[in-house]
Image (cartoon, rainbow, N blue to C red):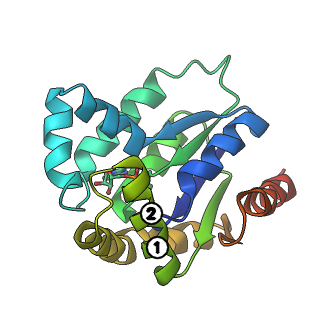
Amino acid sequence: MKNIIICGAPGSGKGTQSKLLIDKYKLMHLSTGDMLRKEIAENTALGKVAKTYIDKGHLIPDELMINIIENILENLDKENVKGILLDGFPRTLAQAEAFEKMMDKHNEETDLLVGLQVDEDELINRLLLRGKESGRSDDNIDTIKERLEVYKNQTKPISQFYDKKGKLVKVDGTGNIEDIFERISKAIDKKK
Ligand code: AMP
């Protein structure tokens, strides 16, 4: 299997690029943000818990997220899944460490972490625009600022974690969508 993590600050284009990448590389899209938003829309017990964190711009506790991913890996149909594109997970060092242990257990490995690079002013503009267009409840200025802080303090360190394993590729996440997609595709193809 080919397993890729796409990582970047909120608004860096992870979701947009993921949709293109899963098509091209026939990967299973695993977006924890989408999963949680679906739980919230369906008003499930998990959704109710998740909402209290998401609305504040905070992360859902590691243990909860790790259990969700572990469950998915346990039930993976390996015959038919060519690889996973992880979008939004791992998001903390504890999640990354737990994820690598799980992957080992399943005789799988992370091939690459694509780190999308976008500067903060552009991230804020993109997120405010998305908030207007999609009405995502966490795309308002206060929550955006909190999410950017959380990203810097808790998520960014996972880049170093994968860099030490020789698996980090930084990709310029600015410009038009097709150009960014081409940059990411090149990075993935180079790893093959
Ligand atoms: P995203 O759509 O990836 O930006 O995620 C939206 C929100 O969902 C985040 O701000 C977090 O509150 C929550 N979330 C998504 N993935 C994770 C994760 N791996 N760990 C903790 N919280 C997460």
Q: Which of 35 and 189 is in front in this view?
A: 35
Indicate left or right for 70 with 84 as reference: left
Label 1, secondary structure: give it. Answer: helix
Crowd around label 1: few <14 · some 14–19 · many ≥20 (10 Å): few
Can residue 159 be seen?
yes
The residue at the point 25 percent across, 67 percent down is 143
- Residue receiving disc 1: 125
Which residue carries the number 2 mark?
A: 129
Percent across and percent down for residue 133 are 43, 52
Whether residue 191 sits left or right of residue 23 in the image: it is right
Task: Give the residue at the far front of this rendering.
Answer: 132
Residue 147 position in % (x across, y down): 31, 68
The response on whether ligand 1 sits within 8 Å of label 1 is no
Q: Which mark is residue 173?
A: none
Q: Viewer-proximal residue, 72 or 13?
A: 13
* 82 or 12, nearer to the observer: 12
> Looking at the picture, does residue 109 appear above or below residue 90?
above
Q: Residues within 10 Å of mark 2 (few under 14, many from 20)?
A: some
What residue is shown at x 66% (from left), y 63% (from top)?
167
Q: Do the residues labelled 1 and 2 touch (CB within 8 Å)?
A: yes
Residue at 24 percent across and 42 percent down: it is 64
Secondary structure category for the residue under label 2: helix
